């Protein structure tokens, strides 16, 4: 079985549509690692596109249902979240409120969470020290995360030695070792921050026990126009075009 893992869509419907158009008919099984909304101009459409998939809660999604959390964000994100909340329908809030913080797929040997395992699901998993903490908390051999918008891989052997891989070979199947544990940051569909403006996502093949990172181009100019037309912060479309 192949599983498409996407996340950090952030209301970027052009990016989401491009990825789903390319992959969903071939794969069918889709898991969304949170932050469906926030930043970009099509939060309702993004929710409509993913609501029938397995989704988990991201911090921007959580802020839609917990207004006091909006003040935890920086001024740009706060402005976008305030705008986003005005666009959503009652059914959208109901959907977001019903999302779990994580999902565990025992049969397929993997777990998904937006940020980190443990007490704070929205903590950023940024380095090998936080990876070590998460490896100790894993009940499956594979963990898929998002939140940082930067693709990265950590692996741990039976002696708890951890390696970090920051260079990703895209469109290349990576065969996994059943004697190792792995953490995969899947990158971002809607707002990549690794210097590449193309959407980033992962395909997990449970039968081959392999993963594949992929990138997808989309109509960024259309997304940029929508951000500007809705008077959202200029910084949002500047960083989008640069992939930072």
Image (spheres, rainbow, N blue to C red):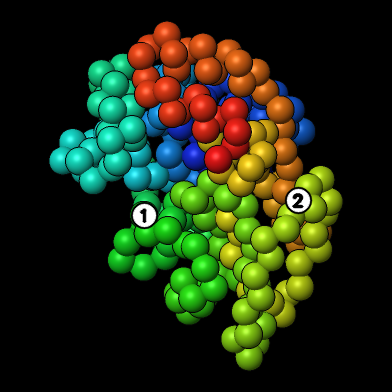
Q: Does dot 2 land on a helix, a strand or a loop?
A: strand
* Above or below 128: residue 199: above
**Visible in this render: residue 103?**
no
Residue for badge 2:
212
Bin the neighbour count of mark 2 within 10 Å (Cα to Cα): few under 14, some 14-19, many 20 and up: some
Q: Position of residue 138 (x, y in %)?
A: 50, 72
Q: Which residue is located at x 63 percent, y 58 percent?
A: 152
Front one among 53 and 86: 86
Residue at the spot of label 1: 122
**Residue that extends furthest to the right in the rendered view of this protein:** 172
| Image point (20%, 41%), residue name | 71
Taking depth in this image into account, of 216 and 48 the one nearest to the observer is: 216
* Residue sitting at the far left: 68
Quarter of the view holding residue 63: top left
> SS for tag 1?
loop
10 Å crowding of disc 1: few (<14), some (14-19), many (20+): many
Q: Position of residue 67 (x, y in %)?
A: 18, 36
> Going by the picture, which residue comes out furthest to the bottom?
159
């Amino acid at each position: 079985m192949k599983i498409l893992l996407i996340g950090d869509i952030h209301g970027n419907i052009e990016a989401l549509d491009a990825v789903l158009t390319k992959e969903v008919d071939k794969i069918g099984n889709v898991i969304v690692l949170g932050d469906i909304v926030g930043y970009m101009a099509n939060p309702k459409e993004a929710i409509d596109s993913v609501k029938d998939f397995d989704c988990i809660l991201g911090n921007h999604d959580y802020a839609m249902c917990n207004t006091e959390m909006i003040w935890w964000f920086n001024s740009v994100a706060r402005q976008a979240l305030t705008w986003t909340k005005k666009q959503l329908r009652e059914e959208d809030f109901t959907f977001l409120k019903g999302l779990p913080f994580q999902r565990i797929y025992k049969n397929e040997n993997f777990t998904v969470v937006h940020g980190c395992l443990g007490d704070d699901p929205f903590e950023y998993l940024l380095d090998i020290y936080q990876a070590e903490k998460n490896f100790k908390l894993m009940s499956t051999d594979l963990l898929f995360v998002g939140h940082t918008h930067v693709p990265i891989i950590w692996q741990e052997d039976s002696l708890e030695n951890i390696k970090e891989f920051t260079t990703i070979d895209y469109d290349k199947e990576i065969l996994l070792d059943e004697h190792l544990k792995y953490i995969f940051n899947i990158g971002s569909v809607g707002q990549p921050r690794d210097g590449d403006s193309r959407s980033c996502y992962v395909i997990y093949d449970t039968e081959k026990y392999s993963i594949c990172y992929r990138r997808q181009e989309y109509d960024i100019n259309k997304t940029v126009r929508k951000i500007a037309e809705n008077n959202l912060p200029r910084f949002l479309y500047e960083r989008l075009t640069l992939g930072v």
